[in-house]
Image (spheres, rainbow, N blue to C red):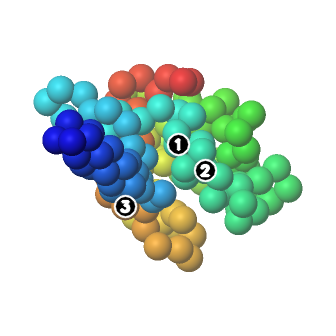
């Protein structure tokens, strides 16, 4: 009987952890040693962040503000190593350099307008994970 109780208790703990370890607002992925920021994949960023930009029709093919379409099939090629049309001194995403990437400046509100436009700022953990993706080379993963 004691083994059954331990097994049942372990199942309850694992089930509870599965609900507390995920957040819809944040990109959750394994962290790299020595870093507090989660290590994001581009597929995570598209699925958890850009989907809102497209859904709001701001960066969809038909309503692409600043000439930027973030639909899944074209987002990478429209961001990485692409010069901004609004801020020509910045690339939208400069691989290896999140501090000089426009997407981070816009998400942090360092340039105006801050994104998401007229919405709540993204959680800092989400912005940090996008910055980490950029700093690690902006892979199309």
Nearest the camera: 89 or 75? 75
Report helix, strand or loop for mark 3.
Answer: loop
Q: In the picture provided, is 70 more to the left or to the right than 19?
A: right
Are dots 1 and 3 in contact, CB under 8 Å? no
Report helix, strand or loop for mark 1.
Answer: helix
- Mark 1 is surrounded, within 10 Å at the Cα level, by few (under 14), some (14 to 19) or many (20 or more) other residues, namely some
Q: Position of residue 9 (x, y in %)?
A: 24, 48
Q: Residue at x 42, y 23 (%)?
A: 137
Between the C-alphas of marks 2 and 3, the distance is 14 Å
Mark 1 lies on residue: 45
Mark 2 lies on residue: 50
Nearest the camera: 20 or 37? 20
Of the two numbered discs 2 and 3 on the same chain, state the one appearing first in sequence: 2
Residue closest to the far front: 1
- Mark 3 is surrounded, within 10 Å at the Cα level, by few (under 14), some (14 to 19) or many (20 or more) other residues, namely few
Are dots 1 and 2 in contact, CB under 8 Å? yes
- Labelled disc at residue 123: 3
Q: In the picture provided, is 132 more to the left or to the right than 113?
A: left
Of the two numbered discs 1 and 3 on the same chain, state the one appearing first in sequence: 1
In the image, residue 30 sits, relative to residue 51, either above or below, namely: above
């Amino acid at each position: 009987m004691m083994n059954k109780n331990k097994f049942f208790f372990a199942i309850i703990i694992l089930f509870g952890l599965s609900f507390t370890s995920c957040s819809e607002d944040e990109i959750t992925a394994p962290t790299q040693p020595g870093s507090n920021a989660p290590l994001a994949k581009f597929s995570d960023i598209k699925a958890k962040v850009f989907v809102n930009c497209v859904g709001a029709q701001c960066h969809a093919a038909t309503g692409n503000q600043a000439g930027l379409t973030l639909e899944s099939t074209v987002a990478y090629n429209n961001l990485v190593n692409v010069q901004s049309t609004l801020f020509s001194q910045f690339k939208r995403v400069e691989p290896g350099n999140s501090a000089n990437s426009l997407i981070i400046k816009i998400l942090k509100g360092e340039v105006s307008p801050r994104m998401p436009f007229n919405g709540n700022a993204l959680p800092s953990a989400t912005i940090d994970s996008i910055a980490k993706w950029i700093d690690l080379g902006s892979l199309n993963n």
